[in-house]
Image (cartoon, rainbow, N blue to C red):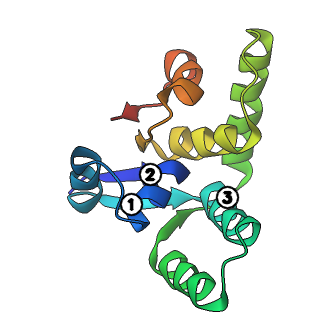
């Protein structure tokens, strides 16, 4: 079974049962994980939307079970390299998208995202593999 990284948008829709059938099939038939930045984005979303304790608890349980790609010196170096390259090309990307891309590139894992445009520059220039 192939391991893939789920972008925040995919996780959010998947957990709500609103992900398209094709994407949901990829999630359910793959060993999936998330980048550390996705965990932060999900938690921020829960706080922004003022989720009650039960919903936050369910998110905590889901996150505790999910394999998470951490940051380390290798990921930090990849992040520095890809963000500098994007900036020099005039394609500065959002901070968390850059961290997610760096985690995927460093680990050699493809990213399943609905926001291909946000990651296209990293795919074109830095070897990020996009699914979907």
Q: Report whether 20 appears left or right of 121.
A: left
Residue 27 lies in what quarter of the image? bottom left
Vertical placement of residue 58 versus 126, above or below: below
The quarter of the picture where the C terminus appears is top left
Residue 51 coordinates in the image, percent (x, y)? 66, 78
Residue 116 coordinates in the image, percent (x, y)? 48, 29
Q: Please name the residue shown 70% across and 68% down the image.
A: 49
The quarter of the picture where the N terminus appears is bottom left
Disc number for residue 14: 1
Q: Which residue is mark 3?
A: 41
User: How far apart, in angstroms, are the residues tagged by discs 3 and 1?
Assistant: 15 Å
Which secondary structure, mark 3?
Answer: helix
Q: Report whether 25 appears left or right of 16.
A: left
Residue 120 coordinates in the image, percent (x, y)? 52, 22
Q: Which residue is mark 2?
A: 10
Please report whichever mark, 2 or 3, sits nearer to the chain's N-terminal start.
Answer: 2
Q: Are marks 3 and 1 in contact (CB under 8 Å)?
A: no
């Amino acid at each position: 079974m192939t391991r893939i990284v789920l972008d925040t948008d995919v996780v959010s829709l998947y957990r709500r049962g609103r992900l398209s059938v094709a994407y949901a099939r990829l999630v359910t038939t793959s060993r999936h994980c998330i980048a550390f930045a996705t965990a932060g984005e999900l938690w921020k979303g829960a706080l922004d939307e003022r989720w009650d304790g039960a919903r936050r608890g369910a998110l905590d349980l889901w996150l505790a079970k999910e394999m998470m790609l951490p940051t380390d010196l290798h990921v930090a170096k990849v992040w520095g390299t890809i963000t500098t390259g994007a900036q020099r090309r005039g394609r500065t990307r959002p901070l968390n998208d850059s961290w997610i891309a760096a985690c995927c590139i460093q680990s050699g894992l493809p990213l399943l995202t609905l926001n291909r445009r946000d990651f296209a520059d990293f795919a074109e220039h830095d070897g990020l593999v996009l699914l979907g």
